[in-house]
C-alpha cells in the first residue's frame, strides 16, 4: 500500500520544512510514503474564499484516480487519540486499497466537490492550526502511528 500526503502551496517556514523532512524519512522505514505539493492557485488574492476553494478543489480532483482512497484532514472530521489513529491505520493496511491519500486543504478548507469525493475525514485536534503547521503535525502523528503499530518506544503511554 502507498500513502501520500497532499497539500496546496509551498511550505514557507524552514523549521516546518525540516520537521516534515525528518518524519518523512523516518516513515520510509515502515511504509511507502510520499508528499505531493500542488501549486498555489494563480491570482488567489483576487478570488473570494469560495472561488479559491472551488479552484483548489478542481486541481485536487483532476489529480485523483478512481481507486484512490481519500481522507481529508478537516476540523470537522473524527478525532482520534494517537493509539486510536494507529489502529485506524492498521485497519486500512488490512483493506485492499492500493493508495491512501491524506489531503490538507488550503486556508479556507475544501470545496463541496472534494468533500463528496472523500471517503473519510479526520481532525488532528479540536484546536485550529495553520494549514502549513498541519503538514508537520500530521507527518509526526503518522510516524507515531507506525511506531505504535510496530511496538517501538517512540510513543509513551
Image (cartoon, rainbow, N blue to C red):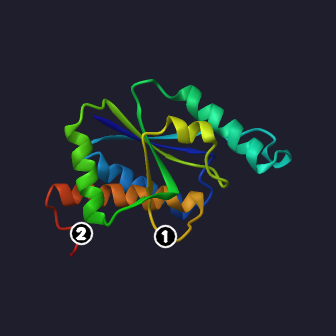
Q: Residue furthest left?
A: 151
Whole-percent x, y for residue 44 in the image: 78, 45
Residue at image x 72%, y 39%? 41
Residue at image x 47%, y 59%? 136
Examine the rendering and report whether any part of residue 108 can be seen.
yes
Relative to 108, say whether 62 is above or below: above
Residue at image x 43%, y 53%? 21
Whole-percent x, y for residue 128 in the image: 56, 68
Examine the rendering and report whether any part of residue 19 can be seen.
no
Sequence-first tag of 2 and 1:
1
Residue at image x 23%, y 41%? 93
What numbered label is drawn on residue 126?
1
Give the distance between the C-alpha atoms of the residues marked 2 and 1, in whole angstroms. Answer: 21 Å
| In-image side of 107 versus 85 (left or right) | right
> In what element is the residue under mark 1?
loop
How packed mark 1 is, by other alpha carbons closer than 10 Å (few <14, some 14-19, many 20 or more), is few
What numbered label is drawn on residue 45?
none
> In what element is the residue under mark 2?
loop
Please identify the quadrant where the N terminus is shown: top left
Q: Nearer the viewer, mark 2 or mark 1?
A: 1
Amino acid at each position: 500500500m502507498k500513502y501520500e500526503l497532499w497539500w496546496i502551496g509551498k511550505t514557507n517556514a524552514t523549521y516546518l520544512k525540516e520537521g516534515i523532512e525528518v518524519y518523512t524519512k523516518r516513515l520510509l522505514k515502515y511504509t511507502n510514503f510520499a508528499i505531493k505539493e500542488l501549486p498555489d492557485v494563480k491570482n488567489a488574492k483576487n478570488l473570494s474564499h469560495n472561488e479559491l476553494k472551488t479552484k483548489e478543489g478542481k486541481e485536487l480532483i483532476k489529480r485523483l484516480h478512481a481507486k484512490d482512497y481519500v481522507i481529508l484532514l478537516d476540523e470537522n472530521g473524527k478525532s482520534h487519540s494517537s493509539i486510536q489513529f494507529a489502529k485506524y491505520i492498521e485497519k486500512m493496511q488490512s483493506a485492499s486499497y492500493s493508495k491512501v491519500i491524506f489531503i490538507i486543504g488550503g486556508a479556507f478548507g475544501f470545496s463541496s466537490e472534494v468533500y463528496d469525493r472523500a471517503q473519510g475525514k479526520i481532525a488532528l485536534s479540536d484546536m485550529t492550526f495553520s494549514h502549513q503547521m498541519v503538514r508537520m503535525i500530521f507527518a509526526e502523528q503518522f510516524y507515531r502511528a507506525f511506531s505504535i503499530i510496530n511496538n517501538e518506544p517512540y510513543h509513551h503511554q
